[in-house]
Amino acid sequence: MTDWLSKQEVDAFVKANPNLKGVDMLLPDMCGILRGKRIGVEAIDKLHEGGVALPGSTYLLDATGRNCETIHYGTRDGDPDFNCLGVAGTLKPVPWANAPTAQVIASMVTRDGDPFFADPRYILARAAQPLVDMGYTPVTAIELEFYLLDARLDEQGRPSTAASPATGQPQTTTQVYGIEELYEFEDFLTDVEDACVAQDVPADTATAEYGPGQYEINLHHVDDPIKACDDAILLKRIIKGVARKHGMVATFMAKPFAERAGCGMHIHLSLIDKDGNNIFAGAHDQETGLPVAPSLKHAIGGLASSMADSMAIFAPNANSYRRFQSNSYAPINTAWGVDNRTVSLRIPRADAKGMRVEHRVAGADANPYLTMAAVLAGVHHGLVNKIDPGPIERGNAYDKPVTHLPLRWWQALNQFGDSTVLPKYLGAHYCETYAAARSFENDTFQAHIPPLDYEWYLRTV
């Protein structure tokens, strides 16, 4: 059950922020895009009394903000309103706003007070419940990669790397883990850190990544997967908002540059039992050389077996699939291994307390709630069925004959639609709606003719 925003929390916030002008009410949609309304401070009590009205189709819009014509919700059902209530603990200031502004995450409820079926936060809660019923608590941490870009597109309408305030020039080389690259955007990173503190988003570390102008910020692990995904969606908002304040654009697009590294969203996951023990930790395991319990291998087996079914969530749009290339650090198969960044499912070297799996498949463009839901579904599926993950991969997994993933959008959507595993966790109705909505966007995207068609075929065929 969601803990709702209370009158006491609202009153205390308004008292502490007497110049407050308004509140951004945030709902993450199917695509992971934050939608909602800006509420005047005089109407702030609606967030805990009665709710703020929005149509249910708000959760089901495509990436361009359009209703999907192939689903029931939208014009077909008259697009009715439902009430949205603020989530406790998420009413926070927006430090980068020009006027004193706050924000709050909200969830939609039906007229009977039940969760709206398409709320990604509800989908995640539903997917996590089988593990909770087993007495386990997921402990998760999310890592996000992004690029800092010039606010203007070039003459060809393409993005370019933002110029460093320190040098006046864009970065041109891949200085992964470079310290000087952090100083080049020091003011931006400092403002991101300050905004995270103001919003109680537990950002951990920042690193220069594998592309010029690319960075990664990690979130600290938490023992609530919904909170972990709230943190991730808010971190993306913080990074975008602070970048805009600094005259830049931050993008989490999976593959903004053909010749550079893509942007991933990696999830670290362990399970804690009721006594606080990490169930993935065991005696010394000869295959891995680590204190790995059979349960960790079973979880990895479940993740591998459900991975192809879940690709339409991990890679939710046309650009997502451009990220998956050999020798790119974006995985293309279901391989697993120890401290190996060419696999999909990596076990980092750690002691027993830190034993976990790192899921490396999803792009930074994926909806964190749905991604986490699919990951937890795979873990539970593996545990209850004791699925063997197969042999460990010790070298370059790109060269190994392991089960490959659907690397075209339409293939992933077809496999998602045929899944017999995911509907048990995400709900059959939601899976049907998701497949129809994403297929509508795929069809719409494919109907457009890109410039490359003219360049290659206009005069040659």
Image: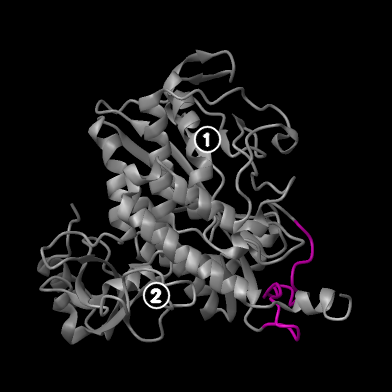
Asked which secondary structure carries label 2, the reply is: loop
> Would residue 421 be found to the left or right of residue 317 on screen?
left
Residue 182: x, y in percent?
64, 61
- Nearest the eye: 16 or 457: 457
Residue 201: x, y in percent?
38, 58
- Nearest the eye: 413 or 314: 413
Nearer-N-terminus badge (1/2): 2
Quadrant for residue 327, please give it: top right
> Label 2 belongs to which residue?
95
- Nearest the eye: 171 or 271: 271
Residue at the (34%, 49%) spot, across then down: 426
Assign the magenta stretch its main secondary structure: loop
Relative to 407, does residue 320 appear above or below in the rendering?
below
> Would residue 72 be found to the left or right of residue 320 on screen?
left
Residue at the (17%, 83%) spot, across then down: 43
Quarter of the image with the C terminus in it:
bottom right
- Nearest the eye: 342 or 65: 65
Residue 163 part of the magenta-drawn span: yes
Name the mark nearer the viewer: 1 or 2: 1
Q: Is residue 302 visible?
A: yes
- The amino acid pointed to by label 1 is Ala
Extreme residue in the right direction: 460
> Label 1 belongs to which residue?
304
Span colored in magenta: 153-174
